[in-house]
Amino acid sequence: MTVPPNLRHEVTCPGGGRLVTIFTPGGFDRYLAELATLTPVQLDDAEFIRELGERYDIWQESS
């Protein structure tokens, strides 16, 4: 299954199972590495977190 960019989605498997997720374009690992270095002040800054998510193309506006 391919999920287009900016499409909200979720996966469920009532009978159990495993899920393998491949993120493309790559970079999610770099997002997590950068996220791990943030200070508590940065983590509490919604604008900063939004900009970080946009930089790594993972930001989804809440509806």
Image (cartoon, rainbow, N blue to C red):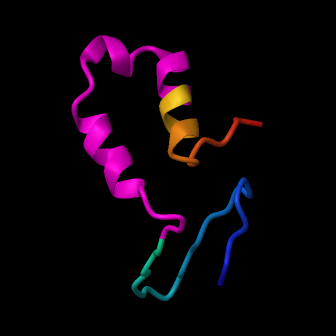
Does 33 appear in magenta?
A: yes
49 vs 27, nearest the viewer: 27
Quarter holding the N terminus is: bottom right
Drawn side of residue 17 relative to residue 10, left or right: left
Q: Where is 6 relative to 37, above or below? A: below
- Tell me which residue sits at (48%, 20%) in the image: 48
Name the outermost residue toward the right.
63
Tell me where residue 18 sits by quadrant.
bottom left
Does 16 appear in magenta?
A: no
Start and end of the magenta stretch? 23-50
17 vs 46, nearest the viewer: 46
Q: Position of residue 26 (x, y in %)?
A: 45, 63
Numbered marks: total: 0
Q: Where is 17 relative to 42, above or below? A: below
Q: Where is 58 relative to 21, above or below? A: above
- Tell me which residue sits at (58%, 72%) in the image: 11
- Tell me which residue sits at (49%, 88%) in the image: 15
Quarter holding the C terminus is: top right
Drawn side of residue 59 relative to residue 17, left or right: right
Q: Position of residue 47 (x, y in %)?
A: 55, 17
Magenta span: predominant SS is: helix
Tell me where residue 38 sits by quadrant.
top left
- Tell me which residue sits at (46%, 75%) in the image: 21
Drawn side of residue 29 relative to residue 17, left or right: left
Q: Position of residue 20 (x, y in %)?
A: 42, 81
